[in-house]
Amino acid sequence: MPAPALTGPSVAVTIAGLLGLDLAFETRVRDISFLVIGLSMGTSVTPEVYESAKQWPFSLVAIVLSVTAAFFFSQLVLKRFWKYDAKTAVLGASPGHLSFVIGLGMDSGADIRLVAIVQSIRVLALTLVVPMLVVWSGLAGNGFVVPTEFMILPWVAVSLALAALVGLGFKKLRVPAAFVLAGMVVSLTTHLSGIIEGHMPQWLTLPALTILGSMIGTRFSGVSWSELRKAFGAGMAITLVGVFAAVLFAVVLSLFIDLPIAQLVVAFAPGGVEAMAAMAFALNLDPTFVATHHIARIFYLSFFVPLALMWWGKD
């Protein structure tokens, strides 16, 4: 299985939650793991990123089109085949930004509990499906690369401290995925400038990926089997719509710009920001590219979801 440190724990903790265990992560543990993941992503970036970045405006436009198409068809599917009311269908179909979606829907009359479960199924399914799709289709190129040069311990400590400070600042500014983005920014700055060399040690990155996978699984803590049965088909349906849109736009865009299809698929797949960025790192794709596009997706949804609720949320 590809990305086992991420996918394995997500499955195990999901099953544990569905069996009745009450599971959650302490906030500080979660934030530290996000810092490590962000720092790990930045260490794999090389100066060639400047050349690649010239093509990013085209892919950023493509992700907006991909998200809009997936959103429209997902809410249509939920209305027509699962008979969701219009507001629940729109909020359940949103390709990401769950906390914002739930806050928006609190006073709308939508079934927020159902929305949360459907969205959780989407995140889990994409975490499991996307790496398999990329690796088993042969799109991952040269596959997994095990780093051989690692940062020395003092630089690891300095990087974590700097990333924590930047992350707290980002959180005050309500930046999405604040600690992952902070780690990536610090790591990019120190590595591209040549101040620090080497990758984050694996004794930090593997536990961080395991924690991230486990956090995805905790979304199902407290969900009953009857609730899961009610939402499972709908969740898988919007997952398939999201994957189809991601693959379609990735293939079309790859005809016009020189970027790997696998990288575009992971960047366009509407999974969790942290999970998709970590997955890019695990699959030896450009994590900076992937993280940038997923953060752009979240910013776009902040403006588009309220409009979608007005346009499509009418019974």
Image (tube, helix red, strand yellow):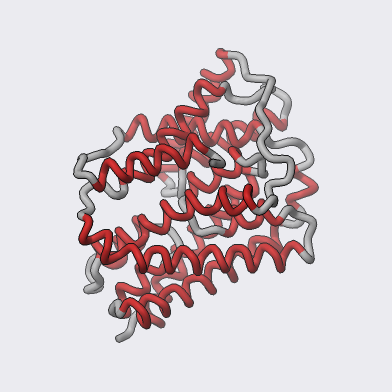
**Which residue ends up furthest to the bottom in the rendered image?**
315
Residue 66, by quadrant, is bottom right
Identify which residue, 76 or 106, lies in the foreground.
76
Write the residue at 62% across / 57% down: 265
Write the residue at 68% across / 32% down: 145
Q: For the N terminus, which image quadrant?
A: top right
List x then y, in percent, for residue 308. 42, 76
Q: Is residue 152 above or below residue 118?
A: above
Write the residue at 62% across / 43% down: 287
Identify which residue, 22 or 199, lies in the foreground.
22
List x then y, in percent, for residue 204. 50, 24
List x then y, in percent, for residue 18. 25, 48
Q: For the C terminus, which image quadrant?
A: bottom left
List x then y, in percent, for residue 102. 30, 61
Write the residue at 67% across / 44% down: 286
109 vs 311, left or right, is left
148 vs 179, left or right, is right
Q: Is residue 203 above or below residue 67?
A: above
Identify which residue, 39 or 114, lies in the foreground.
114
Q: Is residue 95 above or below residue 4?
A: below
Marks counted in the figure total 0
